[in-house]
Image (cartoon, rainbow, N blue to C red):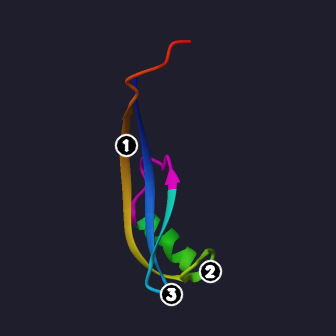
Amino acid sequence: MATTTKTLRMVFTSQAGRNVIISLDNPRGDLTAAEIEAAMDLVIARNIFTSPGGDLVAKQDIKVVDSTTNDLYDPPA
């Protein structure tokens, strides 16, 4: 049986120049890039998250990843 999932991946840059990824499962189907960018700007402006590399200081990338998993074997009960 195949199952498909979607994940929103927002990539930020930290003060140390490292990438920090925040992932959210099952984003809305009608979510726009502008809405995501506005949310990322808010995360940066309000300093909502920090990382081992310091505060998040810039947007780096946005992706919606579709993943399909095919379960080919189920052990007998």
Q: Quote the CA–CA distance across marks 2 and 1.
A: 32 Å
Please name the residue shown 58% across and 78% down the image. Answer: 52
Which disc number belongs to residue 46?
Answer: 2
Q: Which amino acid does the dot numbered 1 rest on?
A: Ser
Please name the residue shown 43% across and 69% down the image. Answer: 11
- How dense is the environment of label 3, judged by Cα within 10 Å: few (below 14), some, or many (20 and up)? some
Please name the residue shown 36% across and 46% down the image. Answer: 66
Viewer-side label of 2, 3: 3
Q: Which residue is disc 3 drawn over?
A: 15
Q: Do the residues under discs 2 and 3 have CB atoms within 8 angstroms?
A: no
Q: Which residue is disc 1 drawn over?
A: 67
Quarter of the figure with the C terminus: top right
Picture coordinates of residue 39, whole percent (x, y): 52, 69
Query: Magenta segment range?
Result: 24-33
Residue 68 falls left or right of residue 57: left
Report helix, strand or loop for mark 2: loop
Give the mark nearer the N terminus: 2 vs 3.
3
* In front of the other: 72 or 76: 76
Q: Is residue 47 above or below residue 40?
A: below
